[in-house]
Amino acid sequence: MEINEYLIKFFSVVRDMENMDFFAGVARLSRTEFRLLREVIMEEEKGRSIISSELARRLGITRSAISQIVTKLEMKGIVKRVDSPTDRKIAYIRLSENTISVFEDQCKEANSIMARVVELVGEDKMKAFFAQYEELSTAMNKAIREAKGA
């Protein structure tokens, strides 16, 4: 296989994996909404709050896109904006009361699908796949750093 074919195949695999829909059965949240919610929950579990600009950075999307998603989730009653007591320019994104059940429903659906994948492929092959992925990821990051001269 030529180098360019490896690159094309790699991008194709990444795209295919990104497009897998683990939430087909419970389409209450999109993948991006789910990821946003996961970030908010992780911060709240640590006793902290998160602001839109940090969510945008973590999800790799614009603050404008985050604002639109948060507005949509607010309308669904899943999150709420809470003004900072010390800075009028800051609003924290926090969970609404029914959020955990929505998040847990989608987690159960995704876990059910992944359990079936493990059943179909086998646990040994899954472990081997992730070990190979780690090796590939390490090599790719090293090559990228070297190309940048770092």
Image (cartoon, grey):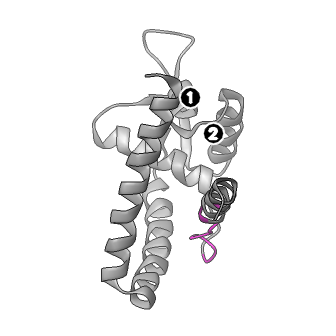
Count of marks, rendered view: 2
Q: Which residue is mark 1?
A: 52
Q: List x then y, in percent, for residue 6.
A: 62, 59
Q: List x then y, in percent, for residue 118.
A: 40, 82
Amino acid bearing label 2: Val
User: Height in image: 140 above or below 113?
Assistant: above
* Contact flag, marks 2 and 1 (Cβ < 8 Å): yes
Magenta residues span 17-25
Q: Is any part of residue 82 visible from this angle? A: no
Label 1: which secondary element:
helix
Quadrant including the N terminus: bottom right
Residue 23 covered by magenta stretch = yes
User: Between residues 39 and 120, which one lies in front from this camera angle?
Assistant: 120
Q: Residue at x 66, y 59 (%)?
A: 2
Q: Which residue is mark 2?
A: 70
User: Between residues 77 and 130, which one lies in front from this camera angle?
Assistant: 130
For residue 137, side relative to residue 31 (left or right) = left
